């Protein structure tokens, strides 16, 4: 946003004129000044003159002989421009004057005729790049005066970096409002005086997409003649970095820069059916925008259409179909309020960022359209003639009224430090033109142009901006809560456990490609294949949001191995993304947090010869057992399972508190080869919430003073029966006095037969209030044997 200090003076009388100091103040208010440009007067001696006579040059076809008068009598001058005739008022440089670039004007003989000076173009005066014709001044410009008095020079232009939440400051009035709050001086809003004609016009306005368009105002101007904008308006547009086109377009741009509301002008005679429809684009629909590019539209594009075709990309750029031209006499001025995300995504999809989209994607004041439309219509009629029809149309689909935010004075002190009472806080907020009532809490009414003020902390920031961020003493903010949540603390503990076990944390991008899905051997119907495509991926081969952390970790492992690091142990904690909607917010995809690890080569303690234990399934299982023990997880179980990307027979499903939580084991060799990894690879992929959720509160239980009863039982079971299943079944039958149980031996042999194994289990019983009798122990032993027999397992020995 470029701010001309000469133009800004129309809206506020600043007590400070030093550009460096103004830049400091604006920076204090949160508007960084990226550059300061001085615009000097680059000419001297130039005067306004009236063209009295124009006739052909007697010896040349490409130039003309003119007579101009500026107070000292008629002067002959040769001119090569053809964009003016008799009666035009021009900027004339008589002999002795100096133009931009220190070019001194004298008398010259041009093809046998003396030329006594020069009729100047804008570029020759240093006022712009236009040099196709001379500068023709507005009718009524006084003749014979110093031209420098009519130019807003010298001037200083501040280029501001406006933050994404402050569309209200992308205007001259918005900046004046901010400086008004700082200097405590009034600011001015331009008055709208409209020459109106009876009637409300014949154009109809329909909003078919109320989610994309909250308000659409249309004002009609009839009987106008498209011409040049006034000289001052053209100069101000150039100062702001915009190219003048014609008075209709220039007025819409001028009002946008002035008030902050982007506008668009339609030639009503080129609007089919005199009907405006706001809708989404139709399949296969195209639009040639004003930059001459034919754009293929999609169903997500929001357009302004007539009765037949799309006429403009909503909030972004108009189309050639209804463009204002020199034959235009009826103009429809559009001022609308658009949904910011819709404009942001549409602008990005088409690679088309305009002055309008830059404002709409931030959020423009929904109360501004009728004011801006009336202002623009009045200026169009004033410059080009005609009148604005009195009955403008205003279609509203989502009314927005000022809202109230409750602010506790204690919240201001908690954030900024003590020393601000209710009166001081109210004073700062009122300087920003906010209505404040009450003492504590303060009830603050926010005007609709401050869409960024929705929470108490936003109001605290307003106080800080005015008081000055450098004025607060160093302090530690007092938090409103009690510190980290249980899950946050347990997540830190989880990281410590894995780092202590010898793994390093990796952070990978959240993108994968179709090749990763194939490499992981997911079946076509597998849930991990239902991915979300990225519209503008960083790389075409990584254009999907990941459904697993393993592809990224495997690529990281491969990168280490190819650089000579054979022993790699990495873990990652991150989100994955699925096409199903989130339970918390159905507008976004389900995106759970996972924990995964990949271990290659050798892992664990080194022997005396420097070697380590090769990685296998037991590596993954050991890491899991360490993690589950340190995280104090209850009812943990590993069950054999098969998965397409995991090694068959060397994979277990993790169960926590009776629910599945993920997989641990070895990577499938085919997957490992795809990622150029040799040997066995220990991996895991676990649901993080199952691991870091709150634990049940511990309850103290006095230790028993009585001796334990210990006995061993060996059971003949099928080879496929997990030890955990046997232990769980028999432990449940042992009763409350069971203190400890575990498998201590596994045997296979000819005596058992093919497909059989023996599991030896040690049981330890202890009562809290007595020594268990032989009879009591025998009853427990019998119950254990009976439970095993009921499952088809035979007691050995």
Image: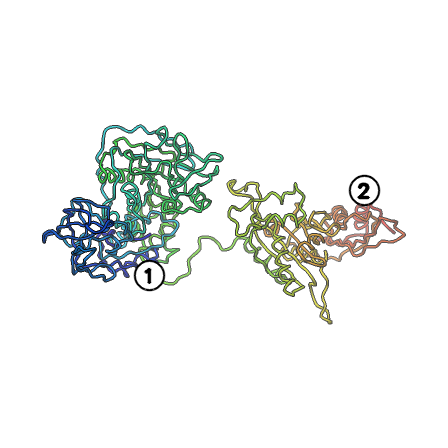
243 lies above or below 269: below
Q: Residue at x 69, y 63 (%)?
A: 603
Query: Which mark is first along the chain, 2 or 1?
Result: 1
Most foreground residue, 640 or 20: 20
Q: Is residue 436 visible?
A: no
Q: Residues within 10 Å of mark 2 (few under 14, many from 20)?
A: few
**What x and y, as percent, mark residue 215?**
36, 36
688 to the left or right of 718: left
How far apart are the two marked residues, 1 and 2, measured between alpha carbons? 79 Å
Q: Is the residue under label 2 in contact with that under label 1 (CB below 8 Å)?
A: no
755 to the left or right of 75: right
Most foreground residue, 587 or 386: 386
Instruction: Check disc 2 and report the residue beneath it.
Output: 790
Most foreground residue, 749 or 409: 749
Q: Residues within 10 Å of mark 1 (few under 14, many from 20)?
A: few
SS class, disc 2:
helix
Instruction: Check disc 1 and report the residue beneath it.
Output: 471
194 lies above or below 796: above
Most foreground residue, 611 or 76: 76
605 lies above or below 3: below
**What x and y, as percent, mark residue 257?**
30, 47
């Amino acid at each position: 946003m470029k701010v001309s200090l000469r133009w800004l003076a129309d809206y506020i009388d600043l007590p400070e004129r030093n550009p460096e100091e103004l830049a400091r103040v604006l920076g204090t208010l949160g508007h960084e000044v990226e550059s300061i440009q001085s615009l000097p007067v680059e000419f001297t001696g130039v005067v306004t003159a009236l063209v009295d006579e124009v006739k052909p040059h007697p010896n040349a076809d490409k130039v003309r002989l003119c007579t101009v008068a500026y107070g000292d009598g008629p002067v002959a001058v040769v001119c090569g421009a053809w964009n003016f005739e008799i009666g035009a008022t021009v900027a004339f440089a008589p002999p002795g004057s100096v133009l931009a670039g220190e070019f001194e004007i004298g008398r010259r003989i041009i093809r046998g005729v003396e030329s006594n000076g020069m009729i100047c173009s804008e570029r020759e005066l240093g006022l712009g790049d236009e040099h196709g014709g001379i500068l023709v001044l507005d009718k009524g410009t006084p003749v014979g005066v110093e031209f420098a008095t009519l130019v807003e020079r010298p001037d200083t232009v501040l280029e501001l970096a406006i933050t994404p939440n402050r569309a209200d400051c992308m205007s001259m009035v918005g900046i004046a409002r901010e400086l008004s709050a700082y200097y405590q001086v009034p600011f001015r809003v331009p008055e709208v005086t409209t020459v109106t004609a009876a009637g409300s016009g014949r154009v109809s306005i329909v909003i078919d997409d109320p989610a994309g368009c909250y308000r659409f105002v249309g004002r009609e101007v009839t009987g106008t003649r498209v011409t040049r904008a006034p000289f001052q308006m053209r100069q101000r547009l150039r100062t702001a970095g915009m190219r003048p086109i014609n008075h209709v377009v220039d007025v819409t741009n001028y009002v946008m820069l002035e008030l902050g509301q982007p506008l668009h002008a339609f030639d009503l005679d080129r609007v089919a059916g005199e009907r405006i429809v706001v809708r989404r684009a139709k399949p296969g629909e195209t639009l040639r925008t004003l930059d001459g590019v034919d754009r293929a539209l999609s169903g997500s594009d929001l357009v302004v259409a007539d009765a037949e075709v799309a006429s403009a990309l909503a909030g972004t750029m108009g189309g050639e179909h209804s463009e204002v031209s020199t034959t235009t006499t009826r103009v429809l001025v559009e001022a609308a309020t658009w949904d910011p995300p819709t404009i942001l995504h549409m602008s990005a999809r088409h690679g088309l960022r305009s002055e309008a989209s830059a404002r709409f994607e931030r959020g423009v004041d929904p109360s501004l359209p009728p004011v801006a439309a009336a202002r623009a219509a009045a200026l169009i009629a004033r410059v080009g003639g005609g009148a604005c029809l009195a009955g403008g149309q205003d279609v509203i689909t989502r009314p927005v009224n000022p809202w109230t935010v409750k602010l506790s004075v204690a919240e201001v002190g908690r954030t900024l430090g003590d020393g601000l009472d209710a009166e001081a806080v109210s004073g700062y907020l009122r300087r920003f033109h906010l209505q404040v009532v009450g003492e504590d809490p303060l009830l603050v009414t926010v005007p609709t142009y401050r869409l960024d003020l929705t929470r108490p902390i936003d109001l605290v920031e307003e106080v800080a901006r005015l008081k000055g961020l450098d004025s607060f003493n160093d302090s530690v903010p007092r938090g409103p809560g009690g510190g980290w949540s249980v899950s946050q603390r347990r997540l830190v503990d989880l990281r410590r456990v894995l780092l202590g076990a010898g793994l390093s944390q990796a952070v990978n991008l959240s993108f994968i490609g179709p090749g990763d899905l194939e490499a992981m051997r997911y079946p076509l119907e597998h849930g991990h294949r239902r991915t979300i495509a990225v519209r503008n991926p960083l790389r075409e081969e990584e254009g999907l949001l990941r459904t697993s952390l393993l592809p990224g970790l495997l690529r990281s492992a491969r990168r280490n191995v190819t650089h000579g690091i054979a022993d790699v142990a990495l873990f990652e904690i991150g989100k994955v993304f699925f096409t199903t909607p989130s339970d918390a917010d159905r507008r976004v995809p389900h995106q759970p947090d996972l924990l995964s690890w990949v271990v290659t080569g050798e892992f664990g303690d080194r022997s005396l010869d420097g070697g380590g234990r090769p990685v296998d399934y037991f590596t993954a299982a050991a890491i899991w057992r360490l993690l589950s023990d340190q995280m104090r997880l209850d009812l943990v179980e590993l069950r054999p399972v098969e998965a397409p990307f995991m090694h068959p027979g060397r994979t277990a499903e993790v169960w926590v508190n009776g629910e599945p939580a993920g997989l641990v084991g070895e990577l499938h060799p085919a997957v490992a080869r795809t990622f150029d990894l040799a040997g066995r690879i220990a991996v895991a992929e676990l649901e993080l919430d199952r691991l870091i959720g709150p634990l049940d509160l511990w309850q103290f239980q006095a230790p028993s003073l009585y001796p334990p009863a210990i006995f061993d039982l060996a059971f003949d079971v099928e080879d496929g029966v997990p030890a955990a299943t046997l232990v769980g079944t028999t432990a449940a039958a042992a009763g409350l006095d069971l203190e400890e149980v575990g498998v201590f031996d596994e045997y296979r042999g000819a005596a058992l037969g093919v497909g059989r194994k023996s599991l030896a289990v040690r049981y330890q019983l202890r009562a809290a209030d007595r020594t268990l009798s032989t009879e009591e122990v025998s009853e427990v032993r019998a119950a254990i044997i009976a439970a095993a027999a009921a499952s088809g397992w035979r007691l050995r020995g």
